[in-house]
Amino acid sequence: MTIAIIYGGNRANGNVETLTKLATEGLAVEEVYLKDYLIEPILDKRHAEEGFPEVNDDYNSIIDRILPHDILIFSTPIYWYSMTGIMKNFVDRWSQTLRDPNYPDFKTMMASKKAYVIAVGGDEPYVKGLPMIQQFQHIFDFIGTSFEGYIIGEGNRPGDISHDLKALAAAEHLRKELQ
Amino acid sequence: MTIAIIYGGNRANGNVETLTKLATEGLAVEEVYLKDYLIEPILDKRHAEEGFPEVNDDYNSIIDRILPHDILIFSTPIYWYSMTGIMKNFVDRWSQTLRDPNYPDFKTMMASKKAYVIAVGGDEPYVKGLPMIQQFQHIFDFIGTSFEGYIIGEGNRPGDISHDLKALAAAEHLRKELQ
Amino acid sequence: MTIAIIYGGNRANGNVETLTKLATEGLAVEEVYLKDYLIEPILDKRHAEEGFPEVNDDYNSIIDRILPHDILIFSTPIYWYSMTGIMKNFVDRWSQTLRDPNYPDFKTMMASKKAYVIAVGGDEPYVKGLPMIQQFQHIFDFIGTSFEGYIIGEGNRPGDISHDLKALAAAEHLRKELQ
Amino acid sequence: MTIAIIYGGNRANGNVETLTKLATEGLAVEEVYLKDYLIEPILDKRHAEEGFPEVNDDYNSIIDRILPHDILIFSTPIYWYSMTGIMKNFVDRWSQTLRDPNYPDFKTMMASKKAYVIAVGGDEPYVKGLPMIQQFQHIFDFIGTSFEGYIIGEGNRPGDISHDLKALAAAEHLRKELQ
């Protein structure tokens, strides 16, 4: 069982990164920081005769890095009660990969994976972050990935997460589960 | 009462655009197609000493166009059970504008507005689109905008929306409300 | 296609009853007013050796009345952001019927039906009523019933529903769908 | 800080009771088992001239027992993706107490309390139980109680909860918080 982490935040050493690193301490992980890449928004060509154009960005290289792994961890700060825009653009592009002849097994491969979500927000994330969790469930249901669990943490200023003992305990617990 | 529409889709004449135009037919509207602009993802510098950097993109020009209006309509296809990534990047950037000395009244102005959401999705949007509606409520609650209503429509292929009589009726109804 | 309506409210001629009658005007309907019956809360004996006891109340007679119909309409005022307690007790008892040898085909029969929900609430029901809609979706998914649609209306004092033009239009639309 | 626990289940020593007792081990608690009392469904007389009738059941005695406490724990099995019908009937009756001249300070007293929810369900409760959590948030927002946290556990057959290590850890954590 190998693990890829998809980071959606753009602040180095942010709260959710801290929490995610705690949950995966000592484990071999492939880390993808979306902020370091160019990911174009999807051009919806699902119904266009010409199909999707090739896009000259880093998206496919990220797909190539995560596909070999058994477990995907989506690690995102909660911006405006949902995943970050860059992570959303990344997910939106799956619609293209689902139709990309270069990735004929994309759905099958995604359907064999397990997924976790780790998210940290500043405004009552334990309740106001729940619609985002429901969306991830719908996303994983569609693509076939098994949604194994999530951790929500509370934090706003850098370092805040160290005060959310409940989230820290959940991260410790997840680490044992991942071993 | 004047109206600005913020379009989050990227397909010309898509289902949600059709539905939105029906809901605003005959009304003077300012139309903003986010797909035609460059909107950088937010760099979260809320807690950085140096503050947010100026960003050389089209975001502020869009803010300038919508701020004079009393009513904002967020019109988005439902991608992966939420607003599109480009619309999400647009909303994410509000965190910067809230701290931008060039927009000292941003929150006050947003708090004086009314908002509607129009969204069309292909996979049981009447239920699976509800977390997105809840997120918009949280977004509007935070910024102070009054969430006046929403229309969800069902459609996948171009033109599908013409078969969703319930959504069409709701659009007709909204048009009367907006007059 | 025949229709049974399950009313969860206890006020005669309440707002949701008015809205439901509008949606079914001119159609033959079997009306079940739960308030007129004794429905005991479920005793959870799913895992007891002796199984569920027979309950001496009106529950089974209601099941007998709704099972012959193709369409079930759950019509409930929104009390505290959910269906009424009496309607919840009615649904809770399905766990018993699912194991009742006198109803060996209960799940199969429920799975052949279509369901609608009509609900009226006083405190921002269009948003705060959405968790209830999500619960009905989970309920129908479990029992196999197809969730065909819902109407949410706003109203508090008797007669208020007549001012919710959007709900009235949706009821008119549903009536055409049911014909 | 004193604690009252409101149990919504009807099975002795059920999974949620086990989890709740773990979370409150060693603490003085007032335990209310709703199943042991008669609680009539509310008769909605909010808008009737004559007002609410006196109800000859155990509801007020339960209110009298919980009102003196600072912390309320709502402990319920998840039946059909929500609190049990008997707990819902109990909450529904608050609408009456809010207008009961014998309880002029009901809302003020409730608004000074902190609340927790502990719930155990058998069908993907970590996701399908979230609408119930959102409803509790709306309930507490309305009455003014501060929603301090919740634990969701997974279990179906008696004793199952002992396998949900995540829930057990959360219960341990809550106990420290309550001390």
Image (cartoon, coloured by chain):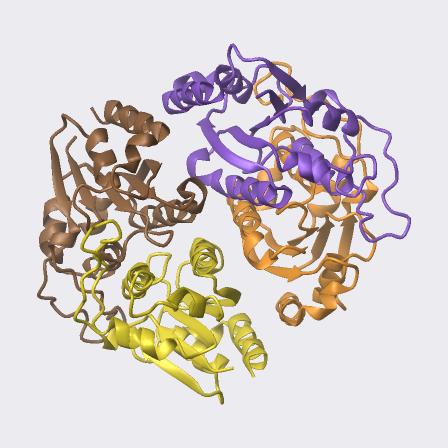
Chain colours: A purple, B orange, C yellow, D brown
- In this rendering, position of residue D101 left or right of residue A45: left
Q: Quadrant of residue D121?
A: top left
Closer to the camera, B62 or A148?
A: A148
Question: Would you say residue B93 is visible in this rendering?
Answer: no
**Residue drawn 48% across and 77% down?**
C70
- In this rendering, position of residue A60 left or right of residue C36: right
Above-or-below relation of C50 to C174:
above
Q: Quadrant of residue A136?
A: top right
Closer to the camera, D21 or D51?
A: D21
**Residue drawn 26% across and 68% down?**
D46
Closer to the camera, B140 or A134?
A: A134
Above-or-below relation of C81 to B136:
below
Q: Position of residue C148 (x, y in %)?
A: 54, 67
Q: Residue furthest right?
A: A50
Question: Would you say residue C167 is visible in this rendering?
Answer: yes
Q: Residue furthest top?
A: A26
Q: Position of residue D75 (x, y in %)?
A: 25, 43
- In this rendering, position of residue C97 left or right of residue A102: left
Q: Position of residue C131 (x, y in %)?
A: 44, 53
**Residue drawn 33% across and 57% down?**
C80
**Residue drawn 30% across and 79% down?**
C12
Which part of the image, by quadrant, shows the N terminus of chain A? top right
Q: How many marks?
A: 0
Above-or-below relation of A119 to B68:
above
Q: Position of residue A172 (x, y in %)?
A: 42, 18
